Amino acid sequence: MAAVTFTPVSDHALMVQLGDEISDALTARVQQLDSAIHAAAPQGLLETVPAFVNLMITFDPVVTDHAEMEQAVRALLQEGAAAQVPGAEREVLVCYDDDLAPDLAAVAKAAGLSPEAVIEQHLAAEYRVGMYGFAPGYAYLSGVPEALQLPRKPKALRDIPAGSVLIAGPQCLVTTLTMPTGWSIIGRSPTEILRNDPERPFLFDVGDRVRFARIDRDRYEKLRKGGTA
């Protein structure tokens, strides 16, 4: 409890900070608190936005205020947050062909591995969605194997295609838009993460588990053009 801080961030939002250093254990605590808040449904609650180390709560300022919401959350923390609801397992397809994975060789060299060994490690890991941020549908995944945890590039590159599979430090993500990035690009996916569905705009929920599955170029091209697996 000593590490938990509460910060008003607007007239209708409260930031709950559970710690400072990103870790699977701390992210699990955030997600457990998120589940507990929704189960308790404090008066005036509108939405929660979980991240790696904190949770933002938005509320109706006509119904409640920062002090009342903080009191409700502190009570949940004292009771012990409810067990985290197990996330669904999602599969993301990825092709590792050289032209779709321009940084794979550099990652392999830095890690002291062959490119095929990098692919094997990337595929063997289980990832978990820790948060969304930066751009629509950008799901930050924890779980990159330690051997592949390399720093970002010193300079970002422009016009990286949507679907690029990126790694940096302990995190992985799949781009949804053409954007610049300083992360290492090790493959490309035809899996749609940003979807044209107002009820479920993203493939993942925070807390979901993600597995990558390798596909060949023919299947990648077919799926990218709207074909079926």
Image (spheres, rainbow, N blue to C red):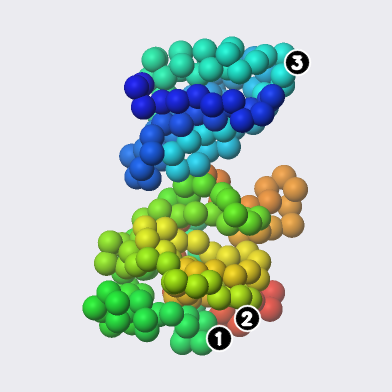
Mark 2 → mark 3, Cα distance in angstroms: 52 Å
**Which residue is nearer to you in this view: 122 or 13?**
13
The residue located at (72%, 14%) in the rendering is: 63
Q: Is residue 5 above or below residue 192?
A: above
Sort mark 2 into few (<14), some (14-19) or many (20+) by Cα contacts within 10 Å.
Answer: few
Position of 71 compared to 47: left or right? left
Query: In terms of secondary structure, where does tag 3 sit?
Result: loop
**Label 3 sits on what residue type?**
Val
Query: In terms of secondary structure, where does tag 2 sit?
Result: helix
Q: Is residue 117 above or below residue 138?
A: below
Sort mark 1 into few (<14), some (14-19) or many (20+) by Cα contacts within 10 Å.
Answer: few
Question: Quadrant of the image for the N terminus?
Answer: top left
Q: Are marks 1 and 2 in contact (CB under 8 Å)?
A: yes
Discs 2/3, front: 3
Query: In terms of secondary structure, where does tag 1 sit?
Result: helix
Q: Are marks 1 and 3 in contact (CB under 8 Å)?
A: no
Q: Which of the numbered marks, if any, corresponds to residue 62?
A: 3
**Which residue is nearer to you in this view: 48 or 67?**
67
* Among numbered discs 1 and 3, the one appearing first in the sequence: 3
The residue located at (34%, 22%) in the rendering is: 2
Q: Which residue is denoted by mark 1 in the rendering?
A: 218
Residue 227 can be seen, yes or no: no
Q: Is residue 67 above or below residue 108?
A: above
Q: Quadrant of residue 29?
A: top left
Q: Quadrant of residue 193?
A: bottom right
Q: Which residue is denoted by mark 2 in the rendering?
A: 222
Sort mark 3 into few (<14), some (14-19) or many (20+) by Cα contacts within 10 Å.
Answer: few
Mark 1 → mark 3, Cα distance in angstroms: 56 Å
Residue 146 can be seen, yes or no: yes
Q: Position of residue 206 (x, y in %)?
A: 52, 44
